[in-house]
Image (cartoon, rainbow, N blue to C red):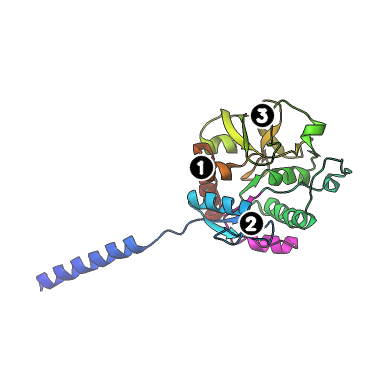
Amino acid sequence: MKRNLKVLAILILAILVLTGCSQKTEAPKIGLSWSTDDAHEDSKDKVDEDTQVFADALRKAGAEVVFLNEIKSLEQAKKEISNVSGVIVTGGADLNPALYNEEPIETLEEIDERRDSSDLFLVQALLEEDKPTIATCRGMQLTNILSGGTLYQDIIVQNPTDIVHRDPNLEVYVKHNITVDKDNLLADAIGKDGVIEVNSWHHQTIKDLGDNLKVIAKADDGTIEAIERTDKTYFLGVQYHPEDQIVADNDENALNLYKSFIAKAEEFSKNK
């Protein structure tokens, strides 16, 4: 009898061990903003080339990627982001200067009113719901607009500088240094402040800073490279492209940023 009980106990222990080993922890779900319905021919996720890079970077950092649909109302935006722990708003075309009550200048480039509308609803919902967010490049600029700020429509014309912020041939990312301030979302995520190297592909940037925004990193020419919303739990804007640094360069700072964001978003989601 004792022997049978011993065998049974061993079997139960083995089952528990095997069951525990077979259980997989679900990766945190991070949403990616919609940009276009046109998929790149080589995209494994049937999305555009830029969105694919964001997806690859998120997966490398440990997230499950959720591709958000085109947003056509604030209600829809809030419903879509309710299914994810955090959101990354991606880059893209120039923003319509009408959004900040300016007329277009001659060197304004292509705008996408459909994308503008979708992103406006999305960012508004992210702010209202206090959803953890990284707003990238155009996304950071839109955050500034929705906070009451304005943009340089073309820094080459309106705010010339010795630093090249975009390859004139539009072929590759250029690189330059930025200085990250102490005690903020970016510094905490990458584990350091001071000078770091980033990539760059933009000709628009923040001019007048919006309300409830804090500048947390700048380039040597004064260009605003990162911001955070001071009234939100985790709302970070970066002018550069950490997603490409992760995929193309295996950049440690960029990967740490994404890993930290994913962890913070998941923690906030569980505690909310």
User: Counting residues from the N terminus, which is met first, the one under dot 2 or under dot 1?
Assistant: 2
Would you say residue 79 sits in the magenta stretch? yes
The image shows residue 83, relative to residue 243, as above or below, that is below
**Residue 216: x, y in percent?**
65, 33
The image shows residue 129, relative to residue 214, as above or below, that is below
The image shows residue 78, relative to residue 182, as above or below, that is below
Could you tell me which secondary element the residue under label 3 belongs to? strand
Instruction: Say which residue label 2 marks.
Output: 48
Instruction: Say which residue label 1 marks.
Output: 255
**Residue 232: x, y in percent?**
66, 45
Residue name at image x 62 percent, y 55 percent: 32
Q: Residues within 10 Å of mark 2 (few under 14, many from 20)?
A: some
Name which residue type carries label 3.
Answer: Ala
Name which residue type carries label 2.
Answer: Asp
**Residue 2: x, y in percent?**
10, 70
Q: Is residue 2 left or right of residue 52?
A: left
- Give me the C-alpha separation between circle 3 and circle 1: 21 Å
Q: Is residue 183 visible?
A: no
The image shows residue 151, relative to residue 163, as above or below, that is below
- Give me the C-alpha separation between circle 2 and circle 3: 29 Å
Q: Which residues are magenta?
A: 68-90
Q: Nearer the viewer, mark 2 or mark 3?
A: 2
User: Counting residues from the N terminus, which is met first, the one under dot 2 or under dot 3?
Assistant: 2
Q: Residues within 10 Å of mark 3 (few under 14, many from 20)?
A: many
Q: Are marks 2 and 3 in contact (CB under 8 Å)?
A: no
Residue name at image x 69 percent, y 58 percent: 36
Compare residues 117 and 85 and report the one nearer the observer.
117
Compare residues 12 and 144 and report the one nearer the observer.
144
Instruction: Say which residue label 3 marks.
Output: 219
Compare residues 56 and 195 and report the one nearer the observer.
56
Residue name at image x 75 percent, y 62 percent: 73
Name which residue type carries label 1.
Answer: Leu
